[in-house]
Image: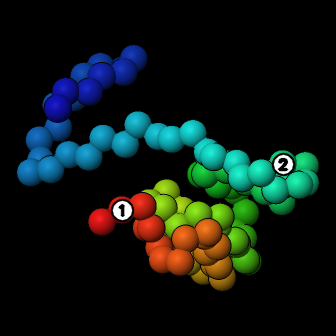
Amino acid sequence: VRVSDNSGQETLIADRIFINTGATPIWPNIDGLLASEHVYSSTDLLVKDKQLKELVILGSGPIGLEFASMYAQFGSHVTIIDKSSKILGHFE
């Protein structure tokens, strides 16, 4: 894969290359959710400059689990809430 930016080009070679183009957060319809100063999107969490002691993740899809794992490794106590009875409920 050849990637480029303002500083030039680089060719990356690997057995597997994953291209993650990002996602748009889906905000559940919960009264007051977006009015809270303690609610973050996945984009917000990527630039958070303070450790969160506790974190609740809404959704057990790939992105929710990725952030739950990452913050658990940082030392946060993480709780995952999902309407499905199992994690990755929409995936095989």
- 3D distance between C-alphas at marks 2 and 1: 28 Å
Closest to the observer, 5 or 76? 76
Identity of the residue drawn at 61% across and 51% down = 42
Image quarter hosting the N terminus: top left
Identity of the residue drawn at 69% across and 71% down = 56
Q: Amino acid at mark 2?
A: Leu
Instruction: Classify 10 Å Cα crowding around label 1: few (below 14), some (14-19), many (20 and above).
Output: few
Indicate left or right for 78 with 90 as reference: right
- Residue contact between numbered discs 2 and 1, judged by CB atoms under 8 Å: no
> Which labelled disc corresponds to residue 79?
none
Q: Quadrant of residue 88 in the image?
A: bottom left
> Which labelled disc corresponds to residue 34?
2
Identity of the residue drawn at 73% across and 77% down = 54
**In this picture, is 65 found above or below 85?**
above
According to the picture, the residue beneath numbered tag 1 turns out to be 91
Q: Amino acid at mark 1?
A: Phe
Give the x, y percent position of residue 64. Answer: 54, 62
Give the x, y percent position of residue 30. Answer: 82, 56
**In this picture, is 17 found above or below 85?**
above
**Secondary structure type for disc 2:** loop
**Tag nearer the camera, 2 or 1:** 1
Give the x, y percent position of residue 79. Answer: 65, 79
Give the x, y percent position of residue 24. Answer: 57, 39
